[in-house]
Structure formats: structure tokens, C-alpha cells
Image (cartoon, rainbow, N blue to C red):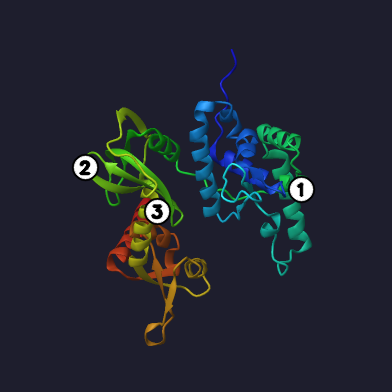
């Protein structure tokens, strides 16, 4: 009896997809990707699973674009908009460093060493076999990209079971830890959409325990997601995710804080380069303050507390108190 196929981690699937799309100039069709790339190919043979697999591919494309990967879609001549004939690629030139970035010989040596370690140790046997399959299809492969090491964000553990429940229309339960609460509460929900906003994954669902829509932060799911046999009380539709993202964007624009980082510190650099940050004039000739935005002041408090004395929270008072509370916990824990 044949052994079941190995479950491919999300990060390996995304890396394999990036690798394949970097290694081709003319691009790959969806069929070529699904039949050859690690993480898709082992499921492609099953006709019954192809609709779910195509949805997975669509989600992965959005994931890569959220990461800043310049994924291009190329229409076939005379067949514009035909998704079966469209080709996908990542132009290597758009990954090249600007001409004004120059490394010292010592830095270049370290980069070469790191690239060799990545090339020799990180590419799985499955990914190498996928490249061989692509060559067999007549796709020109650029072997120089084998040493390319993308930075791929690790998803929360809850992501996969929640997405599966959305696809199948099933209820789930999970322990959820609300801000300022010591004990997690078990929630029973009908998941509707997973969206990525401000560097974090959110679940929008109908909370069946209170019969109301809710949006949950995946990082606050502190235990396993259990899928129930009962069907979801609500089903998703294509309008849910865009609507939730619009709501989160409105919340992000409306939720602001004023902080004063120490000039030249890490806090100063990070907060100034944060999306949406605005600088305001300092009071009575003092250092300038920054207005930063966040959908969640509790998470912002975690981030600011990590900078220690390099940042002062001016307002709102609730955020200042939250940062102070975190510092007090550190002092209490370490004496």
C-alpha cells in the first residue's frame, strides 16, 4: 500500500511557487503550476480536489503580492482574460538591488557564503523534482535563481483549518484571548473570510454564540481550531473579504496615537517608516512628535513597549497606561 503524500508546509509551497515563477521568462500557466510545483502537484492528480486547489492558488497569489512580490499576469495573444491561457511570472530584474547599493568585499563574501548554505540546504527534493518537470515541459529554467532566498512570513497555525472550514462551509470552535483578559474564552463561529491587514491575519466570521458578526485577530487564537460536523450558519460570498478590508482600513485611519521617539534611535527609524505615519511640530521647541496609526491599540502597545525608553507615548492616555503596564510586568518578572 502506497504511503500517503507528505503534507507540504505553507512556507515551502509559497517558496516553491516563487522559485518556479522566477525561473521562467515566458511564464507558467495555471495548469503548469498546479501540476508541477511542490504543494500543488500531489493534489492535482485528483480531479475532485482541483476546484479547492485553484482557490488555494488564488489565495497564494494574493499572499505573494501582500509580501511585495511583483507577480505578473500575462494574457495570451488574442485570448485576453482567459485564465486557462494566462501565464504568471516574477521578473528577476525587479528583484535586483539598485545600482547605488554597494557591498564591501567582506560583506560580499558573507552574502556568497549565505547563498551557498541556502542553495545546498534549503531546497527540498520535491522542489528540485518540480524544476525537472518544468524543464520537461520545455520551460527554460534559470538555475541562478536556485540560490534566491525570499523572506516569507509564517502564517498563524489557525490559518489552514480556518480556510478549510470556509471552503467546506463548516462551523469551528477555538479559544480566543481578548485584550486585558487573563483567560481565553471558547468561541463557536461560522468562518466567512480570512484577510491580511497591517501585517496580520484576521478572521471575519459570524459568532454563533452571540449571533452577531465579529472579526478576530488570528494571533489571539491561543489553541487548536476544532472543526464541527454542523454546517456553518452563514456562507461566504465574494463581497465579504473586500468589505472587511474596507472596514479595517477605516478603523486604521481613525485610530491614531501621538508618540515622541528619541531622535536617531531604532524607534525613530521604525516608526517614521511605518505606513501612514505623520510628523507634527514639537511643543515649545521640543522634538517633533509622530502620529501613528493602528487597527489595534493593544498590539501597538506591545510594539511601543519593546522600544523601552526610546519612545514616549503622548496620547491617548489609555495607550500610555497600557505601555506602562507592560513595563511594570517586565520589572516584576525580572526583579
Residue pictured at 60% horizontal, 36% vertical: 34
Single out the residue that lies furthest toward the right: 105
Residues at marks 2 and 1 touching, judged by CB atoms closer than 8 Å: no
The residue depicted at 48 percent of the width and 44 percent of the height is: 155
Furthest-bottom residue in view? Answer: 284
Q: Is residue 195 above or below residue 38?
A: below
For the residue pair 77 and 30, the one nearer the viewer reads as: 77
Count of labels shown? Answer: 3
Q: Earlier in the sequence, mark 2 or mark 1?
A: 1
In percent of width and height, residue 166 lies at: 38, 38
In the picture of the structure, the residue carrying the numbered disc 3 is 242
Crowding around mark 1 (Cα neighbors within 10 Å: few <14, some 14 to 19, many 20+) is few
Q: Position of residue 1 (x, y in %)?
A: 59, 12
Q: In the image, 295: left or right of 10?
A: left
Q: Secondary structure at mark 1?
A: helix
Q: Is residue 207 left or right of residue 166?
A: left
Q: CA distance from mark 1 to mark 3?
A: 38 Å
Residue 320 x/y as whole percent: 32, 66
Ranked by sequence position, the earlier of labels 3 and 2 is 2
Residue that carries the numbered disc 1 in the rendered image: 144
Nearest the camera: 49 or 230?
Answer: 49
Residue 326 visible to the viewer: no
**218 sits to left or right of 6:** left
User: Which residue occupies 37% across, 35% down?
Assistant: 225
Give residue 297's mark.
none
Amino acid at each position: 500500500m502506497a504511503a500517503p503524500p507528505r503534507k507540504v508546509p505553507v512556507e515551502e509551497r509559497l517558496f516553491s511557487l516563487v522559485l518556479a515563477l522566477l525561473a521562467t521568462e515566458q511564464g507558467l500557466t495555471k495548469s503548469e503550476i498546479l501540476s508541477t510545483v511542490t504543494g500543488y502537484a500531489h493534489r492535482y492528480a485528483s480531479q475532485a480536489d482541483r476546484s479547492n486547489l485553484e482557490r488555494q492558488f488564488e489565495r497564494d497569489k494574493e499572499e505573494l503580492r501582500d509580501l511585495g512580490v511583483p507577480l505578473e499576469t500575462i494574457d495570451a495573444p488574442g485570448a485576453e482574460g482567459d485564465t486557462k491561457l494566462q501565464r504568471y511570472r516574477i521578473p528577476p530584474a525587479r528583484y535586483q538591488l539598485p545600482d547605488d547599493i554597494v557591498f564591501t568585499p567582506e560583506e560580499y563574501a558573507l552574502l556568497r557564503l549565505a547563498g551557498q548554505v541556502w542553495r545546498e540546504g534549503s531546497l527540498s527534493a520535491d522542489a528540485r523534482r518540480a524544476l525537472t518537470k518544468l524543464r520537461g515541459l520545455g520551460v527554460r529554467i534559470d538555475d541562478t535563481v536556485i540560490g534566491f532566498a525570499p523572506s516569507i512570513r509564517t502564517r498563524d497555525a489557525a490559518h489552514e483549518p480556518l480556510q478549510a472550514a470556509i471552503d467546506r462551509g463548516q462551523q469551528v470552535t477555538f479559544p480566543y484571548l481578548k485584550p486585558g483578559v487573563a483567560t481565553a474564552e471558547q468561541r463557536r463561529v461560522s468562518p466567512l473570510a480570512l484577510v491580511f491587514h497591517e501585517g496580520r491575519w484576521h478572521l471575519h466570521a459570524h459568532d454563533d454564540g452571540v449571533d452577531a458578526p465579529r472579526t478576530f485577530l488570528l494571533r489571539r487564537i491561543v489553541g487548536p481550531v476544532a472543526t464541527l460536523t454542523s454546517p456553518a450558519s452563514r456562507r461566504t460570498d465574494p463581497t465579504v473579504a473586500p468589505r472587511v478590508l474596507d472596514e479595517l482600513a477605516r478603523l486604521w485611519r481613525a485610530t491614531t496615537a501621538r508618540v515622541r521617539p528619541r531622535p536617531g534611535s531604532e524607534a525613530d527609524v521604525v516608526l517614521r517608516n511605518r505606513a501612514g505615519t505623520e510628523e507634527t511640530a514639537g511643543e515649545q521647541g521640543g522634538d517633533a512628535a509622530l502620529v501613528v496609526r493602528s487597527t489595534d491599540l493593544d498590539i501597538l502597545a506591545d510594539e511601543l513597549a519593546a522600544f523601552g525608553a526610546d519612545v514616549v507615548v503622548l496620547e491617548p492616555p489609555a495607550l500610555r497606561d497600557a505601555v506602562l503596564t507592560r513595563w511594570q510586568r517586565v520589572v516584576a518578572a525580572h526583579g
